[in-house]
Amino acid sequence: MSNTPYNFKDYIRVIPDFPQPGIRFKDITTLLKDGGAYRAVIEEMRAAVQHMKIDVIAGPEARGFVVGAPLALALGVGFAPIRKSGKLPGETITANYDLEYGKDQLAMHKDAIAPGQRVLIADDLLATGGTIATSINLVRQLGGEVVGAAFLIELAYLDGRDKLEGIDVFSLMTYE
């Protein structure tokens, strides 16, 4: 890592029992509101992934946009949004994933990724890995090569990396 003056965990607000009892929610809005810290986070992530020869970054809504789009800008590459099904106006592909209580579906535009493009998945949080595994599935359906995944925060105790076998994973902050 670079020699940033920031301890990024100091900028993460932990909210107990949200959204349900027993959860300790990691709130990144306290980091985002500090321009210097936000810029430093993106710069740290850029430095960590720039060797991957990325063509495009894909990020799931909504916080994946907050991480992925500025990271794409910092790297000089494009950004492809991954949205909940029914939210994109053009022709899409979809993939289902399991939630704690039910299922949901993510979508990408069919022309978001060209076959052979090198894609980094970026999001704020790696928890159980379900959303990211689904995002990887979408990119691969379009013929993209997923070269890695980058996160602000990883909740290591939820073993999300286990669903990302064979993917180079970078996490700026880890909670054990």
Image (cartoon, grey):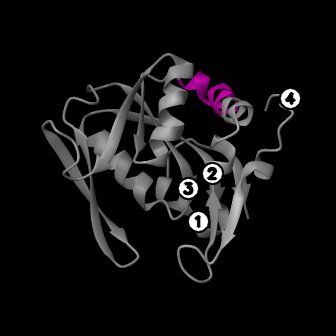
What segment is highlighted magenta in the picture?
42-52
Q: Is residue 151 left or right of residue 8?
A: left
**N-term mark: 4 or 3:** 4
Quadrant of the drawing holding the C terminus: bottom right
The residue to which callout 4 is attached is 3
Q: Is residue 124 left or right of residue 2?
A: left
The residue to which callout 2 is attached is 28
Question: Is the Cβ of the residue at disc 2 closer than 8 Å to that at disc 3?
Answer: no
Residue positioned 73% across, 31% down in the render: 36
Residue positioned 51% across, 65% down in the render: 128
**N-term mark: 1 or 4:** 4
- Mark linked to residue 15: none
Residue 104 appears in the picture as rendered:
yes
Question: Is 50 included in the stretch rendered in magenta?
Answer: yes
**N-term mark: 3 or 1:** 3
Residue 103's spot in the image, x, y percent?
A: 29, 70
Tell me the amino acid under the disc marked 4: Asn
The residue to which callout 1 is attached is 159
Provide the secondary structure element on which disc 3 rests: strand
